[in-house]
Amino acid sequence: MAQKNYTGPVTIDPVTRIEGHLKIRADVRDGVVEKAFSSTQLFRGLEMIVRGRPPQDVHNYVQRACGVCTTTHSLVSIRAVENAIGFTPPPAAQLVRHLILSSLIVHDHLVHFYHLHGLDFIDMADALKADPAAAAKLASEVAEREISPGDYYIAHGRLKKFVASGQLGWLTNAYFLGGHPAYRLSPEENLVMSVNYLTALRIQLKLARAMAVFSGKNPHSQTMQVGGVTCYESLRPERFAEFRELYGECRAFINHEFKGDLTLLARRYPEATRYGTVSNYFAFDDFHDPVSGKDPFFRSGVLWNRDLKRVEALDTEAIQEHVAHSWYAPGPPRHPFDGITAPEYTGYDEADRYSWSKAPRYKNEPMECGPLARRLLAYARGEKETVERLNAWLAIGKFKPAALCSTLGRTACRMVESVILVNRMQGWLDGLEARAKAGPVEIYKEWKMPDKARGVGFCCVTRGALSHWIRIDRGTTANYQMVVPSTWNLGPRCAAGKASPVEESLVGTPVADPERPVEILRTVHSFDPCIACSVHVVQPDGEVRAFKAL
């Protein structure tokens, strides 16, 4: 039986409902996390694979880092090469890339909330006790549109049949089974969110299909290339109409149901705004104006110590990666252009080395990146739509702005970002269609590979700040580094012993039941870990070093 006010270790290994393999170990004292360690349990060699290959081909390899973040790795690799050769793609190509990237971000935010993170809050078994008519009335209120009770009677019947079958699948070991004090939605609220969980399966599929209109296929984009894009057949009226139809239903769901579900969480889980806090945040620029190349829709910057009154400009030269607590040969912190990664597994030792991830730092400090960081920066700058939508969510729970720097605030910022981005996509789509109607539109330009160069690509992806760094020598890839959001957020301690964002965020987290530590999972899941992207290998000198088997 679980102990109240438990003191001792809690280990979650593996963390499920994420991409990749992650271990979290926490020291709990009197029912509260006192210290935590994040260990990525996956070793990969993508950067070693691309050495010596033509730079313009690298994006086809690195997008295989993951089955979730494929298109973003492809795009940022292309941007790195274009930066190295001093190339700017045509405006219409930029619009196509904006639509592909924004579709993927919104798609992944939906998948994350409903299918990875949602069961940390939703008790599907309890939804069987709900009155479907009352649930439909509640759904209409929070979603701010009329919802038919019939949908809820149908979903309620399906859930009943599913449970009666005894084949509960992914719910068999759910933390809410048998009752858990950290689950507090009413039966009707659970039914509302269970229905949206099921609906979101269909919605995210439509977004994937919309993305494929311009990317050629999903998940691995085929049309983005160094020089622009090659989706000539997609710039026809019938393909624009196809995108609009798919996108329209998704936009409605995000503006109503997704927003409504965060209303329910704000009402029922106010304590989740009191833990999961991180001190420092940063983001890159993205979605630049396709003509001027300026005025990014997502703006870069740095916030120190949760100070929303001061935004500092980002200096990418101040980025370094540490390996003091990683399973690599010891060495000093290095800028990504000079990165050296020599694998050296030594066993799990929290006092020494305990993770395959490096520890990225900015000015020697750990930094959180992602939707929370991006929306905090926009909020601090007074960007109107972000301020209005975040203030509306804060008002639901009578929260102060500081509540955004939390587990639930991180999740709310994903919702707000999805709403803002899915609405902004309309303008990019209209702009691209207008160019296509005006006559032949340039979406690709020829370019020339230099003998020697270096470049970097930046991207605001689903989970945060993604960057690829390339050195070109003799026209081939001499060195390649991928510094990804989950490395920033879920890496180990650095040379100075400073905890990573997820390790910091878990301190102070309550644990009602150490055998079912859902509060820890809520915080970890709020970062949307993608571990396959976070671990890489590069051998600049061409030597393949042996390392001990796991």
Image (cartoon, rainbow, N blue to C red):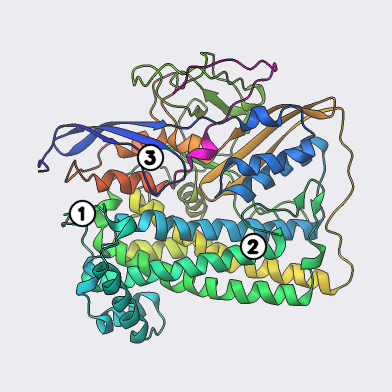
Placement of 319 over or under 151, stated as above or below: above
Instruction: Report if residue 285 is visible in the image.
Output: no
Magenta-drawn segment: 529-550
**461 lies left or right of 242:** left
**Amino acid, disc 1:** Ala
User: Where residue 419 sits in the image (x, y, percent)?
Assistant: 51, 65
In the picture, the disc for residue 550 is none
Task: Give the secondary structure at mark 1.
Answer: loop
Placement of 355 over or under 221, stated as above or below: above
**Amino acid, disc 2:** Met
Residue bearing mark 2? 211
Residue bearing mark 3? 278
Measured Cα–Cα span from mark 1 to mark 2: 37 Å
Looking at the rendered image, the disc whose residue lies closer to the viewer, 1 or 2, is: 2
Which quadrant, please, contains the C terminus?
A: top left
Task: Give the secondary structure at mark 2.
Answer: helix
Say if the magenta span includes residue 547: yes
* Residue nearest the observer in this picture, 470 or 200: 200
Q: Residue at x 41, y 82 (%)?
A: 145
Q: Quadrant of residue 429?
A: bottom right
Q: Residues within 10 Å of mark 3 (few under 14, many from 20)?
A: many
Looking at the image, tell me whether mark 2 or mark 3 is earlier in sequence order: 2
Say if the magenta span includes residue 289: no
* Residue nearest the observer in this picture, 419 or 169: 169
Placement of 445 over or under 153, stated as above or below: above
The rendered magenta stretch, by its main secondary structure, is classed as loop
In the picture, the disc for residue 182 is 1
